[in-house]
Image (cartoon, rainbow, N blue to C red):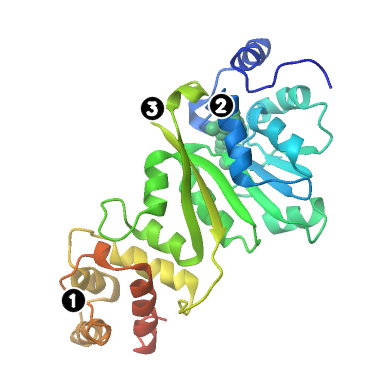
Amino acid sequence: MTDYPEIASPARTQAILNKYHLRAKKSLGQNFLIDLNILHKIIETAGLTKNDNVIEIGPGIGGLTEQLAKVSGKVLAFEIDENLLPVLADTLYQYDNVEIINEDILKANLPKIIDQKFSANQPVKVVGNLPYYITTPIVMNLLASNVSFESITVMMQKEVAERLTSKPNNKSYGSLSVIIQQSCDVEVSFIVPKTAFIPQPAVDSAIVKISKKNISGDQPFNSKRFAAFVRGCFMHRRKTLRNNLQGFFGKTADTKSIILQGLTDLAIKPEWRPEQLSVSQFISLTNKYHELGILR
Ligand code: SAM
């Protein structure tokens, strides 16, 4: 090991940016963490051990990657910006348990790569300071990827974190809250001020930890159809549930009467707004309309 200060220290980060004449690319959501206390808290939240395989999303210049490498078994880091490859090769040269993959995380075949790069039967955890312009697609893709991640610990805009964890009757409660909470436990672990980054983003951030729920109780008959149905219910959040359902299923006399029947069977009032329904009510309604033959 050399005596270099850690990559994420403000002085070293600035030195690396100067050495490589790097300018953070706004278009790729590049905001580099320069607060080691925050990094240590992220590591603690992720609960990593040397037995863990880690997928990192967006290593940047390697600040978080370095901390991940110290405490976990192997780190596979997906970075889209090829200009950062020589930088990472330099900053992380002493960590032989890190591999950088120059791919778009939204396009990568995660099950295949994980199978090739990690030894089987070891937990896979995802950690990352996400590029904010694609936070939601990244999280949704990870959950849809058929990889059973033990946990996902990621930094995102505070406002998106609030939407993911929001409960009924809140302004931030919407389709994203319902869809993710149907299958996962989601919690905001802590808030990160914008001063923890170079360059500073416009808004504060939050660390969110997501883990798959131990499924008990009712499940939607099909998770993709559930997601589409919930999005349909929230299409116009100021309108009533009945109006949104008619927008989703259509307005023929037949569908109108089935829509009403489903709501009545579950004691849900047609004039409620979508944000008044709990996650389990959305699941029941999905399955009810499937049973009544209009949701396939
Ligand atoms: N991990 C570093 C840190 O905490 O200082 C950098 C985090 S920065 C917020 C996000 C990183 O994600 C950038 O390095 C950016 O180039 C990378 N990135 C952006 N879009 C990406 C994509 N589609 N796939 C993989 N990496 C991406």
Crowding at mark 3 (Cα within 10 Å: few <14, some 14-19, many 20+): few
Name the residue carrying label 2. 33
Question: Which residue type carries mark 3?
Answer: Ala
Q: Dot 2 lies on which element?
A: strand
Within 10 Å of the Cα at label 2, are there few (<14), some (14-19), or many (20+) other Cα atoms?
A: many
Does mark 2 have its CB less than 8 Å from ligand 1? Answer: yes
Tag 1: residue type? Answer: Lys
Between marks 3 and 2, how big is the CA–CA gap? Answer: 14 Å
Q: Position of residue 95 (x, y in %)?
A: 81, 31
Secondary structure found at label 3: loop
Q: Is residue 108 visible?
A: no
Give the x, y percent position of residue 202. Answer: 38, 27
- The residue wearing badge 1 is 269
Amino acid at the residue labelled 2: Leu
Looking at the image, how many numbered discs can be counted on the residues? 3
SS type, badge 1: loop
The image quadrant where one finds the N terminus is: top right
Question: In this rendering, would 236 be left or right of 9?
Answer: left
CB contact under 8 Å: marks 3 and 2: no
Residue nearest the viewer, comparing 261 with 162: 162
Is any atom of residue 82 visible in this view? yes
Give the residue at x 62% y 12%.
11
Relative to 214, residue 120 above or below:
above
Pointer 3 residue: 202
Residue under the image location 35 percent in, 54 percent down: 166
- Ligand 1 within 8 Å of the CB at mark 3: no
Q: Residue at x 67, y 30 (%)?
A: 82
Q: Quadrant of the C terminus?
A: bottom left
- Say above or below: 150 vs 102: below
* Marks 1/3: CA–CA distance: 41 Å
